[in-house]
Image (cartoon, rainbow, N blue to C red):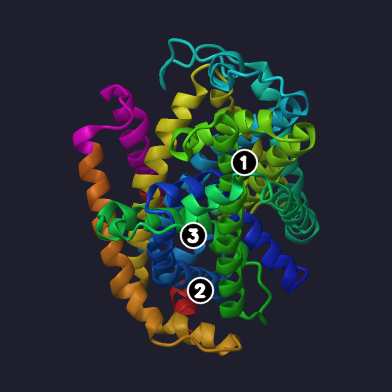
């Protein structure tokens, strides 16, 4: 089978940017910046972007372009012993995909609620009690299935399925060519409106006024590094898959820089949007901004609805805000499902249509666990482990392989051969020293802290099964697949040496 290719350079960049820009940019970044020193957060964030984000993106685009395969193929072509890491990454992608779609589903519901603000004044009670119907649940006691959550999730799955089933150029590229411009237009229109509301400037001052004392706090650096991999979709099979469809003649370095810079620029736009709204809300309620700010799920589904209640023309701004979340989320969901699908196509040599049907069918069924009363708790616990343990460990292992177990200069040479401007030896310094050292420290700290303190007050048995157990299971499955894989990869290693 000849490998599919992107139809145009712009199409590839839009798809890569579509993957990178997601829920993480809108609900994670602004709060993270606020919590970690406001304007001063940009120092560690830029540092993480330059030393980890850009090098990682260049390496993954270079590897996907050179070795033309999904994550397991790429790693097994480097050395057949490394194939397991590709499957571990595909596993992380699969797990994230099944809960990420739940948040897209909630956001879809909230587009509807926003028209008449049917969440009422107590948006907290509305979200937890009326919408999620969270009761005496826990991550392992999910309660009953909720049709009103399952329906929007099904719509999200249908869109992702249609894109991935149709193929790289006709499906994924075409979807992103619609979704990305729509997202940018919506966000710019929203900013143009809310940035002039009274109080908005105070909100922005909060976000951008640097608290340099935070720069000596290790947690701030860890937060910046932790955010960069998730937001750029690197280290969990996505960008390897996307770049494996690049045509032979492609400017890898330029594409990587564009993707990273557009994504990080968009995060700042999202920060401006959210903090203008929060500043306005604080002013209207006569409160300090610190009293109204919240993070994560609370920011999107409790605080924003409260703010929308106070906004002029809430029936326009409200639906637009949630639609932006939906659009950003969908283009990322498509990419994460493609990461899994392309690995299955490569491994089993089956058609895209069959692979996409199996992946989306199974993913849909599993994701229904999140359309339950306890879905939020399950999501919270699994998300913590995937982001703070599995993904960062995967990135660290990838860095050790790329920096120390193969010749990183080979990849740099390949990249330089096909790109307009050359990448200097700084790439190797970042891949071999700066990033792995930072990550080793962060992963180590996360492991020790989670081991000692647990997470979110969940039961030990839940942490053991759905956190540690799930993470270990993904690695073990990868290793088993690696072992039983036919060792007929001898030609592959030669490919990698080329
Ligand atoms: N980059 C995406 C985000 O920031 C996540 C990876 S794809 C589900 O939301």
Among the two numbered marks 2 and 1 on one chain, the one whose residue lies closer to the N terminus: 2
Q: Nearer the viewer, residue 125 or 208?
A: 208
Q: Are marks 2 and 1 in contact (CB under 8 Å)?
A: no
Disc on res. 234? 3
- Neighbours of disc 2 within 10 Å: few (<14), some (14-19), many (20+): many
Q: Distance between the residues labelled 3 and 1?
A: 21 Å
Q: Mark 2 points at which residue?
A: 58
Magenta stretch secondary structure, dominant: helix
Disc on res. 443? none
Based on the picture, tell me whether residue 476 belongs to the magenta stretch.
Answer: yes
Give the foreground label among 2 and 1: 2
Residue appearing at x 51%, y 23% in the figure = 375
One can see residue 236 in this view = no
Q: Which of 266 and 195 is in front in this view?
A: 195
Magenta residues, as a range? 451-478
Q: Nearer the viewer, residue 113 or 363?
A: 113
Q: Are marks 3 and 1 in contact (CB under 8 Å)?
A: no
Horizontally, residue 211 falls left or right of residue 21, namely: left
Quarter containing the N terminus: bottom right
Among the two numbered marks 3 and 1 on one chain, the one whose residue lies closer to the N terminus: 3
Q: Mark 1 points at which residue?
A: 359
Residue 376 percent across, percent down from the top left = 50, 26
């Amino acid at each position: 089978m000849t490998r599919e290719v992107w139809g145009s350079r712009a199409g590839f960049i839009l798809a890569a940017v579509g993957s990178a820009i997601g829920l993480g940019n809108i609900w994670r970044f602004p709060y993270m910046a606020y919590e970690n020193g406001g304007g001063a957060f940009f120092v560690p964030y830029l540092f993480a972007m330059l030393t980890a984000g850009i090098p990682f993106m260049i390496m993954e685009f270079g590897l996907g372009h050179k070795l033309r395969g999904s994550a397991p193929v790429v790693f097994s072509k480097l050395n057949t012993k490394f194939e397991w890491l590709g499957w571990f990454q595909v596993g992380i992608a699969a797990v994230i995909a099944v809960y990420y779609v739940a948040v897209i589903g909630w956001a879809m519901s909230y587009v509807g609620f926003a028209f008449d603000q049917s969440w009422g004044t107590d948006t907290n009670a509305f979200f937890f009690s009326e919408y999620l119907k969270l009761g005496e649940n826990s991550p392992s006691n999910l309660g009953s299935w909720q049709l009103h959550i399952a329906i929007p999730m099904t719509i999200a799955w249908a869109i992702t399925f249609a894109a991935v089933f149709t193929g790289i150029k006709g499906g994924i590229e075409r979807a992103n060519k619609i979704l990305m411009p729509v997202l940018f237009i919506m966000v710019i229109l929203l900013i143009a409106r809310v940035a002039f509301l009274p109080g908005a400037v105070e909100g922005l001052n909060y976000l951008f006024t640097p608290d340099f004392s935070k720069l000596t706090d290790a947690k701030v650096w860890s937060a910046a590094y932790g955010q960069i991999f998730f937001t750029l979709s690197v280290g969990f099979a996505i960008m390897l898959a996307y770049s494996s469809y690049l045509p032979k003649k492609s400017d890898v370095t330029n594409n990587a820089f564009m993707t990273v810079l557009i994504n990080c620029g968009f995060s700042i736009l999202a920060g401006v949007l959210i903090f203008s709204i929060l500043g306005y809300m604080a002013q209207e309620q006569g409160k300090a901004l610190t009293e109204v700010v919240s993070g994560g799920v609370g920011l999107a589904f409790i605080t924003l609805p409260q703010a929308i209640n106070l906004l002029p023309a809430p029936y326009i701004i409200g639906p637009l805000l949630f639609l932006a979340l939906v659009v950003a989320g969908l283009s990322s969901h498509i990419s994460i499902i493609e990461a899994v699908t392309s690995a299955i196509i490569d491994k089993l040599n089956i058609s895209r249509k069959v692979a996409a049907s199996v992946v989306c069918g199974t993913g849909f069924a599993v994701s229904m666990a999140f359309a339950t009363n306890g879905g939020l708790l399950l999501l919270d616990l699994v998300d913590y482990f995937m982001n703070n343990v599995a993904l960062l460990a995967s990135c660290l292992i990838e860095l050790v392989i790329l920096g120390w177990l193969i010749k990183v200069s080979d990849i740099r040479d390949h990249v330089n051969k096909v790109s307009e401007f050359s990448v200097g030896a700084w790439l190797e310094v970042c891949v071999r020293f700066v990033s792995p050292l930072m990550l080793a420290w962060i992963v180590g700290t996360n492991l020790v802290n989670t081991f000692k303190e647990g997470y979110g007050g969940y039961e030990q048995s839940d942490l053991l099964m759905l956190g540690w157990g799930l993470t270990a299971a993904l690695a073990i499955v990868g290793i088993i697949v690696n072992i039983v894989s036919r060792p007929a990869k001898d030609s592959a290693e030669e490919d990698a040496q080329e």
